[in-house]
Amino acid sequence: MASALAYKKNYKPSAALELFYTGGPVVLSRDGTCAACACADDVKIVDVESGKVVSILKGDTELVTALCFSLDGKALLSASRSLQIRLWEIASATCLRSWKAHDAPVASMALDSSGGLIATAGADRNVFVWDVDGGFCTHAFRGHKGIVTSVIFHPDPERLLLFSAGDDGTVRVWDLVKKACINVLDKHFSVVTSLAVSGDGWSLLSAGRDKVVNVWNLKGFSHKTTIPVYETLEAVCIIPDGCKLPGSKINGGSGVRFLTVGELGSIRIWNSENAQCLYNQKPLVTSSNNEKEDTKGGITHATVANGDRIMCVTSDQCLLFFEPAPGEGDHVDLKLTKRLIGYNDEIIDLKYVGTDATRLAVATNLERIRIYDMESMACLQELVGHTDIVLCLDTCVTISGQSLMVSSAKDNTARLWNLENGTCMGVAAGHMAAVGAVSFSKKKKNFFLSGSSDRTIKLWVFEGIASESGEAAKLTSRAVVAAHDKDINALAIAPNDSLVCSASQDRTAKVWKLPELTPVITLTGHKRGVWSAEFSPVDQCVMTGSGDKTIRIWSLTDGSCLKTFEGHTASVLRASFITRGTQIISVGADGLVKLWTIKNNECTNTFDNHEDKIWALAVSDDGSKLATGGADSMVNLWTDCTAEDDEEAYRQEEEEALKDQELANALRDTDYIKAVELAFELKRPYRLLNVFEEINRKEDSTSRMQTILQALGKEHLRLLLEYIRDWNSKAKFCHVAQRVLFSMLHVVSPTDLIVVPVVQINTRFLPRD
């Protein structure tokens, strides 16, 4: 006999891919474990290993412009457009001190080797040095003719020098003892974006947007050499001596090794002695033609941590971490070990990858598709191929066990991907407008369907395509039909591959026979466009979700509406069957996730963890895991906790039963103090009334009652006063209520009663002077 079907009752948020970086400054702690990222007006501290936000430093409504960690990584200094510098304690997320710095925003900050001084570079053309503990200015340097873009202390504590660079193309050297500028280095012809001092302290490197790196001798502040790099640079970093980064096994002379990053999106390592490029990494960030030139895959910041790890920040808000790895021969290569995505923009679609639901494919307002690991929250890979925004995803595991994904985009194409190696197997080109819907075969898993804004549905067969070939195969459509009068929003294929349902903005859903795509039935009744469709896994029916805020279940026999679910306060954007087709999970433009039980037509539960409309919903095969993504850039992961909740409820029932028995035993044994404690703990006012009635029958009732009332805390006094109020409203219990209140007023002082929240003082009838 089959076991009874267990309905799901509750899902709880288990993890989230949350927004933590929106552009601007990013700094890495000295031990490389944490990164501080500007997130609009807040600062979020991210644990590098787990990718989770461990602390949020609340801002002042103005954008953050500069950040700097303390030497021990326990404190952080931040500057914003409010012109304030704030000193934060990270563990408690509290602001210890704040002060006004410049008359314009701070562009850069640097801490000296002792950790006691911090230098700030401002857009007001000034450089200030501050005492961190006192918050007062120790030095004020003026001389730049433009915005000061970068500032750095000399690493040697015996050499009290400060270097600053500006958009006037100069680097200025400041003596902290003389409190004056002792030299101006002016070999740049554009903005100087970054400065670095060599490990021995005798060379200064300056990088700029004039596509060169200048090397300066700090013994006489003379210019040593200019290295052309043929790229607009954003950062230059010194490679520490003896580290394992690329270039260490190449005979590159005795000069300083350094890395540069910029608009090309690659890491290059150089030797200053002979201007030789020791290592040139292939760009990881590939951009489409529709992106702006100033955001085309560039790297905006780089840091070398612990000598053997490089962190790069890209223009599309990604944090990339590289470590040395064996290359060809004796050479060392750079391997991408972690990719943290700071900002996903709107989440348009989600799908679980494989059968174990440990990876998640995410489509955002980009032409790239990101694959996330659900354990580490890191982006495992980016699938590049589309030339416009990706709109829809679907995944499947073939009969042979191969993980595949199909994606569609605004570039009028659909692409078939092999998720085992991240290669594009085939391109389905033929639509005349954006392709907004795709769906894999559910049984044979050798074809997929695509629906477009050109109002057509096409069937594509991919059986026999070799995934290892270098070039993606060109797929040919086997069937096509002009399906709707407006855009097609969703496609769903029946479990046996015999039918497909299309949902459209023309307010209808239509069922078609496969593989010929001949019409079967039209489902009419929605008052707004239909956003979602899915076949029942067990019954001859199909479900649709619409902009009219309803979910409907339709009969495939005659096209009649069998059930209507109302509860969302805005458009239903996605809906899916769970629990073997007996329940529905839905998401909408109201930012809510709703769980429905089909049998009784009721909403079982509602979950709220989004701040904007939810576009995407992914459900694991067994329905135990959900992923939702929306316009708030959040991906929330949900786990079914019905079994845990039932177990907890059963445990609480057992505990209450035991305490009820203890209460009865205490009354039988005339242990009134324990009986009162248990009645309060169980929140049983009637049992508490019974206890006071028992006490009231005793000869020494007054002393017994006063002893009990003297021991009550503030919370118990509050509850008792509420109970007395209710008892006093009934003639049957008012005598006991008055007796308890009388005893309370004798043993509890007025000052103690005044602080009880439910007690209100009425001074109207008090005598006046």
Image (cartoon, helix red, strand yellow):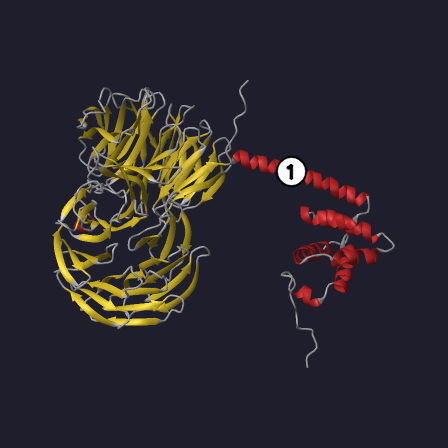
Helix, strand or loop status at disc 1: helix
Instruction: Give the camera-side residue of 403 and 214.
Output: 214
Q: Quadrant of residue 571?
A: top left
Quadrant location, the N terminus:
top right
| Residue at 18% over, 44% down | 290
Asked whether 723 or 97 is in front, the reply is 97
Residue 492 position, x and y percent, is: 33, 29
- Residue furthest toward the right? 699
* Mark 1: amino acid: Glu
Measured from the top left, where is residue 388 in percent x and y? 21, 40
In the rendered image, which residue does mark 1 sit on?
Answer: 653
Identify the residue at image location x=34%, y=68%: 130
Q: Quadrant of the C terminus?
A: bottom right
* Foreground of the two, 184 or 348: 184
Q: Is residue 271 left or right of residue 37?
A: left
In the image, taking residue 238 as reference, residue 188 lies left or right, namely left
The crowd level at tag 1 (other Cα within 10 Å; few <14, some 14-19, many 20+) is: few
Residue 492 in sight here? no
